[in-house]
Image (cartoon, coloured by chain):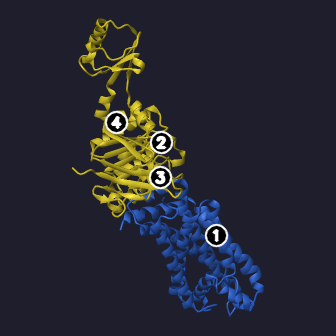
Amino acid sequence: MAPIVRIENLTKSYASGFQALKGVSLDIEEGEILALLGPNGAGKTTMISIVCGIVTPSGGRVTVAGHDVVKDFRRTREIIGLVPQELTLDAFETVFNTVAFSRGLHGRKPDPALIEKILRELSLWDKKDTMLRQLSGGMRRRVLIAKALSYEPKVLFLDEPTAGVDVTLRKEMWQLVERLRATGVTIILTTHYIEEAEEIADRIGVINKGEILLVEDKAALMQKLGRKQLTVELAEPLEAVPEGLAAFRLRLGEGGQSLVYEYDTAGERTGITALLAAMAEQGLRLKDVSTEQSSLEDIFVELVGDAK
Amino acid sequence: MNFEAIKSIYAFEMARTRRTLMQSVVSPVVSTSLYFIVFGAAIGSRVQEIEGVPYGAFIAPGLIMLTLLNQCIGNGSFGIYFPKFTGTIYEILSAPISTAEIVIGYVGAAATKGLIIGTIILATASLFVDITIAHPLLMVVFFVLTAVSFSLFGFMIGIWAKDFEQLNIIPMLVIPPLVFLGGSFYSIDMLPPFWQTVSHFNPVLYLVSGFRWSFFEIADVNPWISLAIVVAFLGACLAVTAWIFRTGYKLKN
């Protein structure tokens, strides 16, 4: 199946000369949840803004459901929903009216029953006649989501939906994303929170300084995450890994002071007992033992750090 | 054509007008009434008729134009400036709507509001002075064309303005001199020849003169030239607006 969003070699330079995107390519499959991780200023929002039509690309091309976002903007924007990062809302509108306004803007006939359903789902129904400026930050975030859902988008961009949101609302947000996915909506969310990506995404992309560094299935990434390292510090340095330990595929640490063993925590047997027994057999004296698990955070920090 | 979107923007803007009914409707009525009391009744009674029209009635078309211009520019500029200021413009830019539809929505609402207030001022004026409309159809044409052109002009100011000061600078500094020196309160025949010539470069002269002709059949310039100027101004505003959206000027990066 063709990807629902195809980003090809997208570039964006601002008038100041700042290059926000340096040739980004990304395919987003229909029905998936893609999390884009990246530090501030990585280009996440610029990329989303181009897909949604708020920013004009400098080069490259984006198609949504096969339509070009610039030439065929009507077709693409009809099916794209956007929940922006900033809590930008009118001050004097009521909750219900602002949501109904969004639906109208997207060319949909009024449907109060649907809006009621959305507002109830987001626990906003009792606030429907409240003026927007009287709402708390969390409520405003929900209103922005309600606005984006009001026209039943097929592709939904959530730009840092849980930034500055309390734990309860964050959990609710994750459940909402799950429910939306069940209805076939494709969801692209940007986040700083690695646990958020781990929790809800099917695929995870890492973006930094206008470049996509990695896009991988969460499962594959988690497998990497499942790897653990056992480091055995030795009392006396070694020149090479002793032949008797070859089966464990050990790596000699810096200065021959340690031996590093990698194992899979998910495996039936970790092989640690056998390794330690074999080491004793070889007559090695151990000074210390430590284990370390690589996390998505490590991978992220490593990738972003390398790019600096 | 995304009619639902046009309807939504229009309704949104009209709702804003209803929320601010006092300042939108009541204040122009009060200020115009003051003009009629001062210039119409107090001073006007000592001013001789101009080409057979009593002074109080003579200034009525000019006062209606003054209010119409201010209202249309104010509404047109504020309607688009505010979403830009708060950031809610993102929603307009990411919606499946064309430039023309955005303009019809915002400018249509601003012009409607201007026309409603203009009509109220006309009704108010008729309480103070005798008003006859010789050419109602032409009067309506001038009325509507002026409302649309200046709402569009306001819309452009709203897009151009970086802050509230810039938003107000044209309505406050440019429009009043143009209106006051455009023959709203006098016939330019009363001016020295040099200032008569200068006045002919003032677009508002043509508006007021044409509009007044539709009431009293007296004019400083040929009403058809007035009409042509109004249409040309509208065309220029349309062209600039089209350019703004094509290039994304001050709207998009």
Where is mark 3, residue-wise? A19
Find out whether the residues at labels 2 and 3 contact each other: C-beta distance under 8 Å. Answer: no
Quadrant for residue B50, please give it: bottom right
Does residue B187 appear anywhere in the picture?
no
Vertical order, B153 against A275 (above or below): below
Determine the CA span between mark 2 and mark 4. 22 Å
Where is mark 4, residue-wise? A200
Q: Nearer the viewer, residue A143 or A171?
A: A171
- Comparing labels 1 and 4, the label whose residue is closer to the camera: 4
- Comparing labels 2 and 4, the label whose residue is closer to the camera: 4
Query: Dot 4: what SS?
Result: helix
Amino acid marked by disc 4: Ile
Q: Which chain is yellow?
A: A
Amino acid marked by disc 3: Gln
Query: Dot 3: what SS?
Result: strand
Vertical order, B108 against B56 (above or below): above
Q: Earlier in the sequence, mark 3 or mark 4?
A: 3
Q: Earlier in the sequence, mark 2 or mark 4?
A: 2
Where is mark 2, residue-wise? A139
Q: Alpha-carbon neighbours of circle 4 within 10 Å: few (<14), some, or many (≥20)? A: some
- Comparing labels 1 and 3, the label whose residue is closer to the camera: 3
Determine the CA span between mark 3 and mark 4. 30 Å
